[in-house]
Image (cartoon, rainbow, N blue to C red):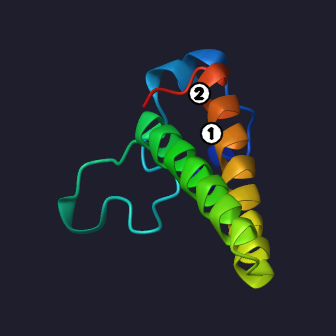
Amino acid sequence: MQARAQHHRPRTREEYQRGLPDYHDPTAGFGGAAPAYSALTLRIVLATLAVLLCAGGAVLFAVYGEWWGTVLLGVVGLGSLVDLGWVIHRKRRGEPG
């Protein structure tokens, strides 16, 4: 019960800079596993790559007149752009990764 009460309190900047153990890990500590830390830099690189590839693919589909591909890659690219913005926000907030 004490761990649950501690989970709902606001986190300090020092906790974010130090890293949040078991962040988004439903199996945290199961079987003696080490605490997981977020890989924010990797997510920034992957989201940037996804945005660029989707933009390039959407342009190619538009040039060839395939509007379904343009719309599909536009939606996926927009989702990747939102994810990129959120991950950059978390990184600037001070979370390691």
- The number of numbered badges drawn on the structure is 2
Q: Which amino acid does label 1 sit on?
A: Val
Q: How many neighbours does mark 2 have within 10 angstroms: few (below 14), some (14-19), or many (20 or more)?
A: some
Residue behind mark 2: 91
Residue 86 horizontal/vertical position (percent) = 71, 41
Can you name the residue that lies furthest to the top here? 14
User: Under tag 2, what secondary structure?
Assistant: helix
Front-most of residues 6 and 33? 33
- Residue lying at 60% horizontally and 63% vertically, measured from the top left: 57
Q: Would you say 2 lies left or right of 59 here?
A: left
Q: Would you say 95 lies left or right of 89 here?
A: left
Q: Quadrant of the C terminus?
A: top left
Q: In this view, does 69 lie above or below 14?
A: below
Q: Would you say 38 lies left or right of 36 here?
A: right
Can you name the residue that lies furthest to the left here? 32
Q: Identify the mark at residue 49; answer none if there is no mark.
A: none
Residue behind mark 1: 87
Q: What residue type is labelled 2?
A: Lys
Front-most of residues 64 and 40? 64
Q: Are marks 2 and 1 in contact (CB under 8 Å)?
A: yes
User: Under tag 1, what secondary structure?
Assistant: helix
- Residue lying at 22% horizontally and 58% vertically, measured from the top left: 33
Front-most of residues 80 and 37? 80
Residue 4 visible: yes
Residue 40 horizontal/vertical position (percent) = 48, 38
- Residue lying at 52% horizontally and 57% vertically, measured from the top left: 24
Label 2 to label 1, Cα distance in Å? 6 Å
Residue 1 visible: no
